[in-house]
Amino acid sequence: MINIAILGFGVVGSGTCEVLSNNADIIKKRIGEEIYVKKILDLRDFPDSPYASRVTHEADEVFSDPEIKVAVETIGGARVAYDYTKRALSNGISVVTSNKELVSTHGPELIKLAKENNCVYLFEAAVGGGIPIIRPLYKCLAANNILKIAGIVNGTTNYILSSMKNEGISYEDALKEAQKKGYAEADPTADCEGIDAQRKISILSTLAMDGKYCNPEYVHAEGISKLTTDDIELAKALCCELKLIAYFANNGDGTASAFVAPHFVDKACMLSDVEGVFNAVLVEGDYLGEAVFYGRGAGSYPTASAVAGDVLEACLKDSVDMEFRAWDDTVSVFKDYDDIKSDFLVYSKTEDVASLIDGADKIDSVSGINAVIVRSISEKDLIGKIAGNSAIGYKHYLK
Amino acid sequence: MINIAILGFGVVGSGTCEVLSNNADIIKKRIGEEIYVKKILDLRDFPDSPYASRVTHEADEVFSDPEIKVAVETIGGARVAYDYTKRALSNGISVVTSNKELVSTHGPELIKLAKENNCVYLFEAAVGGGIPIIRPLYKCLAANNILKIAGIVNGTTNYILSSMKNEGISYEDALKEAQKKGYAEADPTADCEGIDAQRKISILSTLAMDGKYCNPEYVHAEGISKLTTDDIELAKALCCELKLIAYFANNGDGTASAFVAPHFVDKACMLSDVEGVFNAVLVEGDYLGEAVFYGRGAGSYPTASAVAGDVLEACLKDSVDMEFRAWDDTVSVFKDYDDIKSDFLVYSKTEDVASLIDGADKIDSVSGINAVIVRSISEKDLIGKIAGNSAIGYKHYLK
């Protein structure tokens, strides 16, 4: 029997208990041992839960218990969770988490600490919820240079954008609806301003660059709160979908780019079909070409599914294959946003945008809008070309 | 330095050499050792290849070389490849392959042999080409019961169906076009009669059932060679896409179902958007919900990408996590096709099909075709209900 602890008995923590309990038979068959949730650390009591007797408020009871091999950190945030994760790893207890804020902020230190104490820090659930993405990126594409990642990694914003499009409502109304349905939090800042996506792309970017740490603090993040129904209409007219994309590119010269911004996504791109709370991550490897991973990016069960998968992996520590390469935060290979070149769709109802920018590809529009694709340019340089002409608009572009 | 051998220097074998050679730097960084292709076993000579001096025609030179740790079997088929794989594994040499025929036919024996000789038999490339699917299914969904798999796993047939739809041409013409472009072989039987898909779903089904072996021989496989432009037109009229689907279901009572057949795929299903030579596999886990893996299912580089990923894994044998559970071929939990219940779309231009079948859901059509969805019925029982009425047609249905 392998004893584990749950830190934080909220939606994901209790969901993880449920997966481990309901699928106990197959799990035992698969890893050869039973997994037992010995302690649950939470400030609250859960008198009605079948786990009530295992709940403790004393962190020491968990971290100094030599029987506990794995801790599931589902507290969230980077304060208490940070402290507890360090205590667990320092005591040789492997930690499994869905906490993208903590992984993206303190990954270099925590992965190092895990290695030093001969345990592991696993976080498949931190990006894409239940969708397998971290492990495929790290293991299955191990022989590839990762050239590009483009992801719809935040279900809340994708749901809002889908509602705006399908129901023709404003951002504010779509947000209210999402909040009512439980898809958006009372304070929607982290989701809607792209901060959640910023954390996730920082994790994926670090993995894609073999551990060269991408600090989320320096990743440009533009959210969706300024988008209007006009933007949605424009996307339709230009045969695109308006999506919040978390983007990574290996520039091939030792540098890399990462940012989060709304994009006009061409209908030919698989990401354009991703609706509602679903997530999808497109990965391009130099030999694989493009692959897309699609599914439920959030929610108690899908996230718990990924957390529980990592718990099994951590329980099999002797055969664990996920000891990440050290995350090196001593040098940064990631470019400042002002220096990042990417593709834009530039449009105007009145101006001949094609004549404005050399080498831009004109694209067809169903509504007589002038539009071109400008490739590999920084947003700063693009603004320079537009030179304050308020009749011209633009968005990042993905095909 | 880790020495490996390539068995069969064809499209995938030479592609694997190229991946390992061109990405040697990152691979060395990732696994901490250099991988060296020491021997290439092939009947042919390759005087113009940079690998010419390493080519041998003598199998003994490979299998009795104590320095060779991993063999890449890219011969194909289940005769010579079978013999060589057994010889390698018997000598403690791990084998990595893209050979679905061999894995699906002799998996139980070969996995056992690998375990007995303390090496591994890995086959991520055998399904979905470069798309990570085997490892995510096996590892990331480790805490889930796999309830369902529906895959477009054969690029040739998907290309032909896309051509028939987009160009309005017949099966025969689309096949010829595919052969001209190198997407179909001169003898297209294995692809077009669903045999390739049969092998792949047998592998996925066995993994999904925790090693309870699904013998491809008993998997019902209906291909696309009898499909006509009328079928394509019908699909359009019913707002579906006509796709060759490899299907698995866990029946929840200890039994499972697996088969390959053309399906009308509802537009709401992500698989309906998969065009041309692309592959996609939809997996449903009891906690994950549905996830889709999409990408290039064939071709030299994508397949070599997956093979090379497995080579890295096999080289790290001490930390390998992919020692599959034994494949047990002593009992079969897979149902005979006549007993398999699945969903069908039943249609007629003249008959009122809704009145024919109790509890069927009527669906809308743009062309006045009468159509219903009949759920959870065997094809045999469905045929009984139709009772030889030639004005009524049907296809498997997937939403």
Image (spheres, coloured by chain):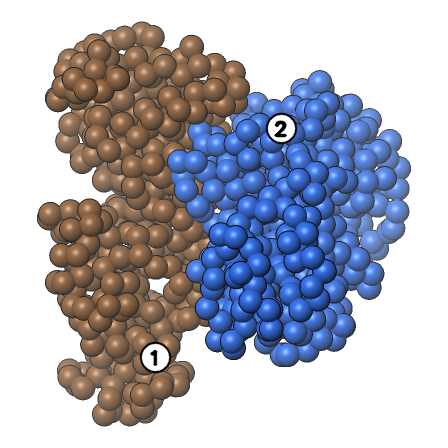
Chain colours: A blue, B brown
- Between tags 2 and 1, which lies in front? 2
Report in which chain the residue with disc 1 lies: B
Point out the residue furthest to the top here. Answer: B66
Say what secondary structure mark 1 lies in: loop
| Residue A102 shows up from this direction | no
Is residue A243 depicted above or below A41 in this figure?
Answer: below
Say what secondary structure mark 2 lies in: loop
Quarter of the picture holding the N terminus of chain A: top right
Report in which chain the residue with disc 2 lies: A
Report the disc number at residue A211.
2
Measured as percent of width and height from the top left, residue B122 is found at: 37, 31
Q: Amino acid at mark 2?
A: Gly
Residue at image position (26%, 46%) is B199
Report the disc number at residue B238.
1
Q: Residues within 10 Å of mark 2 (few under 14, many from 20)?
A: some
From the viewer's side, name the closer residue of A115 and B297: B297
| Residue A204 shows up from this direction | yes
Measured as percent of width and height from the top left, residue B6 is found at: 27, 22
Report the disc number at residue B182.
none
